[in-house]
Image: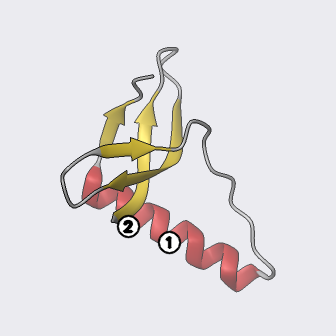
């Protein structure tokens, strides 16, 4: 399986970051709720934010579909 952070547009037009999974067969899944950014120290938080920014640049925005 492959996963990344995905910026998603919700029905109310708000944007939120979700974890997004793509299986080897091409099936796509994502977390129902947006992620929170946490860490044990400032470097971990900064690293998470950077990974999210990189994935937004790479994958863009997808519509949230329930």
For the residues labelled 1 and 2, say whether their Cβ atoms are less than 8 Å apart. yes
Give how far across and how far down residue 5 sits, in percent.
44, 57
Residue at 69% x, 53% y is: 36
Q: In the image, is 11 to the left or to the right of 43?
A: left
The residue drawn where x is 31% and y is 58% is 57
How many numbered marks appear?
A: 2
- Element type at marker 2? helix
Q: In which quadrant will I find the N terminus? A: bottom left
Q: Is residue 40 left or right of residue 53?
A: right
Kindly state the secondary structure of the residue where label 1 is placed: helix
Give the quadrant of the C terminus.
top left
Kindly identify which numbered label has been placed on residue 13: none
Give percent across and percent down for residue 41. Answer: 79, 82
Q: Which residue is mark 1?
A: 50
Q: Which mark is residue 54?
A: 2
Q: In this view of the protein, which residue sits in the foreground, 14 or 64?
A: 64
Q: Is residue 34 left or right of residue 9?
A: right
- The answer to which quarter of the image holds residue 34 is top right
* Furthest residue in direction left, as rendered: 25
Q: Position of residue 42 (x, y in %)?
A: 75, 80
Percent from the top left, x then y, of residue 11? 47, 15
């Amino acid at each position: 399986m492959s996963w990344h952070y995905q910026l998603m547009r919700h029905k109310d037009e708000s944007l939120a970051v979700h974890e997004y999974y793509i299986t080897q067969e091409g099936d796509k899944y994502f977390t129902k709720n947006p992620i929170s950014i946490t860490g044990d120290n400032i470097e971990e938080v900064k690293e998470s934010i950077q990974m999210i920014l990189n994935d937004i640049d790479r994958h863009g925005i997808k519509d949230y579909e329930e």
